[in-house]
Image: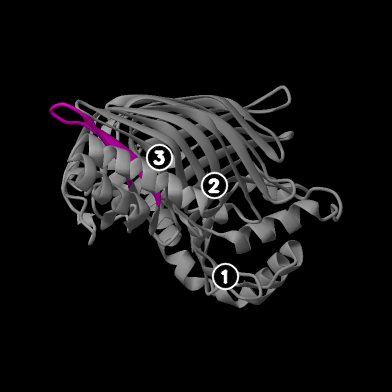
Amino acid sequence: MRWLKISAFLLGVVLLFALILPFLIPLNRYLPQIQKMASDKLGEPVRMTELKLAILPLPSFTLTGISLGKSQKTKIGAVTVRPDLWSLLSGVKVLREVEIEGVTFNQALIDIIAALATRPSDGPQTIKIKRIKLSALQVDMDTLQWGPLRADIALDDQGVSAIDAGSEDKRFNLSLVPTEGGQRLNIEAKDWNLPLKPALKFDTLTAKGLLKEHELNLPEINANLYGGTLKATLNANWKQGWKVKGEAHTAQVELKEIVALLTSATRLSGKLNANGGYTMNAKEAGQLADNLRGNFKFNVQRGVLYGLDLERAVQSLATQGTRGGQTQFDELSGTLVIAGKHYQMNQMKVASGILSADGNVDIAANKKLAGRVNVAMKGTASLIEVPLDVSGTVSDPVLFPNRAALAGAAVGTAIMGPGWGTSVGSKAGQALEKLFK
């Protein structure tokens, strides 16, 4: 019992010493030297505000208030280093774990990493890191805003041996394992929003592929979203700028919520089937979304065009234009061409009971509309056909009867009566307009 009491007393003294020691050692006097070493290693100015020592549960050093680069825009909340104590007596110091908290991943940090990767080695390796953990990581790349993220990186003598990363809420998970020719990549997501506009919500998402030094290839992307499915491919290369290309195929995806992400007012609903290819090229990764190019054939089933009443526009032939209303359709098909924020809907066809239409519509980057739609509607005993000019904006579309066709329709109606006379006159007026252009 006497030895137990002595042992307990000594243990208490050691624990008390371990708790008090960090406060007795003035570590901040070493900050200038550490800053200089880090600056020389990175080739960029490094600033730190405080250095702390913790003895329990295992010895560790923590640096806080870190900023990198000449502009000091790249900031890190804290870096904690947990060394292998026995290695401190050898020539190569082993760090069991380096934990980085609160870092913003931006273009400035990418430039620092790229410059560091291309610098020649300055001699034999004196520090070996076994594990790097990142938490509260934020991505800030122009249109790409994403976080908080986490990452757990295991390293060996050959480099990275495994990566487990993703969002801190576990809705997005990514793993990387070395394989022949690169890193085998696996992505899984559930109930996850894309961190780019439009912020599509995926019920499930899986992707498999290969990551190389300057290239990512994902030949298998499968997702469930908005009641339908998506199958896609992606190839990205960033050796000289950023270049992305791939294909996408959707089946029975409900459009109403997706369109609402693009505009304040819902303008289209229905089940989308589409397929086509896309590319994105930009100097920086955050600019990719603004440089999207795509060409897709589409077919929308059993939907509604909101803000456009084609039937009323044909029946009224209003010279001041027709606004509001809606058009239900059985099928809407055509080709969508995307150029950044500019969209073109070509070879459009609309089928809806007694009404059918075809034409082209252009949506400018400022959301203004331009185009023409030829509408044919069955009457009680005849077929009325009227070309309508599309104008206004996505949130406030306007349908105007074509002026020449409107004048011809009036003459045709006066001579041959409504219905067939209106249709013939409209066509004649339209033909004259083309003749004298």
Q: State the residue position of label 1.
A: 67
Q: State the residue position of label 3.
A: 359
- Asked if residue 184 lies left or right of residue 171, the reply is right
Q: State the residue position of label 2.
A: 292
* Residues marked 1 and 2 touching at CB (< 8 Å): no
**Residue 40 versus residue 204: which sits nearer the camera?**
204
Q: On the image, which quarter does residue 16 sit in?
A: bottom left
**Residue 54 versus residue 171: which sits nearer the camera?**
171
**Residue range corresponding to the magenta coloring:** 371-387
Q: Is residue 35 above or below residue 409?
A: below
Give the number of the mark in front: 1 or 2: 2
Give the number of the mark in front: 2 or 3: 3
Mark 3 surroundings within 10 Å by alpha-carbon count, few (fewer than 14), some (14 through 19), many (20 or more): many
**Residue 226 % position (x, y):** 28, 31
How has the structure been colored for display? one colour
Q: On the image, which quarter does residue 357 sit in?
A: top left
Which amino acid is tagged 1? Ser
* Secondary structure mostly taken by the magenta-highlighted segment of the chain: strand
**Residue 348 % position (x, y):** 40, 35
Image point (53%, 71%), residue name: 25
**Residue 379 % position (x, y):** 16, 31
Distance from Cα at disc 2 to Cα at disc 3: 24 Å
Q: Secondary structure at mark 3?
A: strand
Q: Secondary structure at mark 2?
A: strand
**Residue 269 versus residue 405: which sits nearer the camera?**
405
Mark 1 surroundings within 10 Å by alpha-carbon count, few (fewer than 14), some (14 through 19), many (20 or more): some
**Residue 33 % position (x, y):** 69, 73
**Residue 305 versus residue 73: which sits nearer the camera?**
305
Distance from Cα at disc 1 to Cα at disc 2: 34 Å
Q: Secondary structure at mark 1?
A: strand
Image point (54%, 29%), residue name: 247
For the N terminus, which image quadrant? top left
